[in-house]
C-alpha cells in the first residue's frame, strides 16, 4: 500500500486511475511506470479482484510490455481507448457494487460513452482523473463537460450558437429550451423549482471555475479549492450531463445519432 498514490482513497479510484494510466500510455501521453506496477500488484494480490482484471493487466508486468500489445492490436487512439474502457468495465462495476455509497460514476460513464465516447466521455474521464490530484483542474473540466454536452446536443439538433461569444449559461439556456427543461416551460411548481436548481448549478459551476479553477491567472493570495470542492463540482456536472444526454435520447428516440454510431 505504501507504494500506491496516496491521494487515491478507494479501490474504485485505484482501478480508475490504473485505467487512465493505460489510456495515457496507449495514446502517447505520460504514464508513471512505477504507479502502474504498484497498482497492478495491489489488485493481483486480491483473490476476489484478480479474475476481473483486464487480461492485458495480468499479462503485462510493466508499461513497456503493454505498449507493443496495444500498438499492434489497434491503429487509432480511439480504438485503443475503447478497448481499455471495455476491458476495465467488469472491474469497475464490481468495485462500485461493493461501495454502494460511492457516486454512481459507472452510470454516468456508460451514458456519456454511449452518447459520445471521443468527446464527451473523454472530458468526463479527465475530470475524474483530476479530482484528487488537481482540484483546480477538475473544477475547470467539470464546467467543460457541461459545455461539451450542450454543444453536442445543439449541433445534433442543428441549433446555431456563436462559438466565439456564447458562454455556459447561454449554452445551457438554449439546450434546456430545446429539451423542454427550462423552468418557464412548466407550470407545476415542483418542476419549476427542480429545473431552476439545475440552472443554478450551471451558473454556480461557471462562477466556481472562474474563482478557483485553473482557467485564469492567480493573484498573490489565490483561493485554493479543497478536494471536496472538486468532488462536488465533478459529481454535479456528471449527474446533470447524464440527465441532459438521457433527455436528448428520449426526445429523439435513439441512444445515439447515425453519425455517432459510425
Image (tube, rainbow, N blue to C red):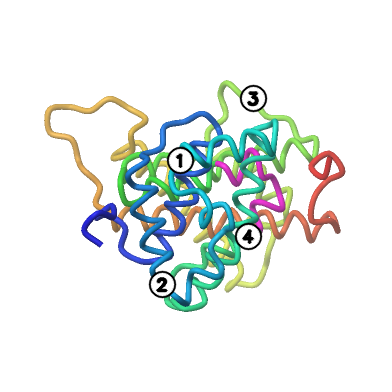
Which residue carries the number 3 mark? 162
Helix, strand, or loop for circle 2? loop
Q: CA distance from mark 4 to mark 2?
A: 36 Å
**Nearest to viewer (mark 4 / mark 3):** 4
Question: In the rendered view of the protein, which quadrant contains the C terminus?
Answer: top right
Quarter of the view holding residue 180: bottom right
Q: Earlier in the sequence, mark 4 or mark 2?
A: 2
- Whether the residues at callouts 4 and 2 have beta carbons within 8 Å, the answer is no
* Magenta-colored stretch includes residue 203: no
Q: Do residues under tags 4 and 3 come within 8 Å of each other at their CB atoms?
A: no
Q: Position of residue 227 (x, y in %)?
A: 28, 54
Distance of label 4 from label 1 (alpha carbons): 37 Å
Q: Which mark is residue 243?
A: 4
Quick one: label 4 or label 1, which is nearer the N terminus?
A: 1
Q: Which residue is mark 1?
A: 63
- Residue 75 screen position, x and y as percent: 70, 31
Look at mark 2 in the image and give the residue it sits on: 46
Q: How many marks?
A: 4
* Magenta stretch holds residue 117: yes
Give the vertical position of 106 relative to 252 (above or below).
Answer: below
Looking at the rendered structure, the secondary structure element under dot 1 is helix
Amino acid at each position: 500500500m505504501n507504494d500506491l498514490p496516496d491521494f487515491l482513497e478507494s479501490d474504485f479510484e485505484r482501478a480508475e486511475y490504473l485505467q487512465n494510466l493505460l489510456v495515457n500510455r496507449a495514446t502517447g501521453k505520460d504514464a508513471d511506470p512505477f504507479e502502474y506496477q504498484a497498482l497492478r500488484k495491489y489488485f493481483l494480490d486480491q483473490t476476489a479482484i484478480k479474475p476481473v482484471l483486464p487480461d492485458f493487466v495480468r499479462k503485462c508486468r510493466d508499461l513497456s510490455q503493454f505498449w507493443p500489445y496495444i500498438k499492434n492490436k489497434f491503429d487509432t487512439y480511439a480504438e485503443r481507448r475503447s478497448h481499455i474502457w471495455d476491458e476495465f468495465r467488469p472491474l469497475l462495476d464490481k468495485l462500485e457494487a461493493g461501495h454502494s455509497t460511492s457516486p454512481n460514476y459507472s452510470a454516468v460513464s456508460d451514458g456519456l460513452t454511449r452518447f459520445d465516447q471521443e468527446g464527451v466521455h473523454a472530458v468526463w474521464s479527465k475530470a475524474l482523473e483530476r479530482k484528487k490530484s488537481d482540484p483546480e483542474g477538475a473544477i475547470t473540466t467539470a464546467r467543460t463537460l457541461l459545455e461539451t454536452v450542450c454543444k453536442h446536443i445543439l449541433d445534433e439538433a442543428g441549433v446555431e450558437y456563436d462559438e466565439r461569444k456564447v458562454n455556459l449559461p447561454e449554452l445551457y439556456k438554449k439546450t434546456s429550451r430545446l429539451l423542454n427543461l427550462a423552468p418557464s416551460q412548466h407550470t407545476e411548481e415542483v418542476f419549476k423549482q427542480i429545473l431552476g436548481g439545475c440552472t443554478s448549478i450551471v451558473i454556480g459551476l461557471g462562477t466556481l471555475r472562474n474563482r478557483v479553477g485553473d482557467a485564469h491567472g492567480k493573484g498573490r493570495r489565490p483561493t485554493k479549492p479543497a478536494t471536496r470542492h472538486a468532488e462536488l463540482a465533478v459529481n454535479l456536472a456528471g449527474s446533470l450531463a447524464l440527465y441532459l444526454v438521457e433527455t436528448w435520447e428520449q426526445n429523439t428516440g435513439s441512444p445515439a445519432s447515425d453519425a455517432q454510431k459510425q
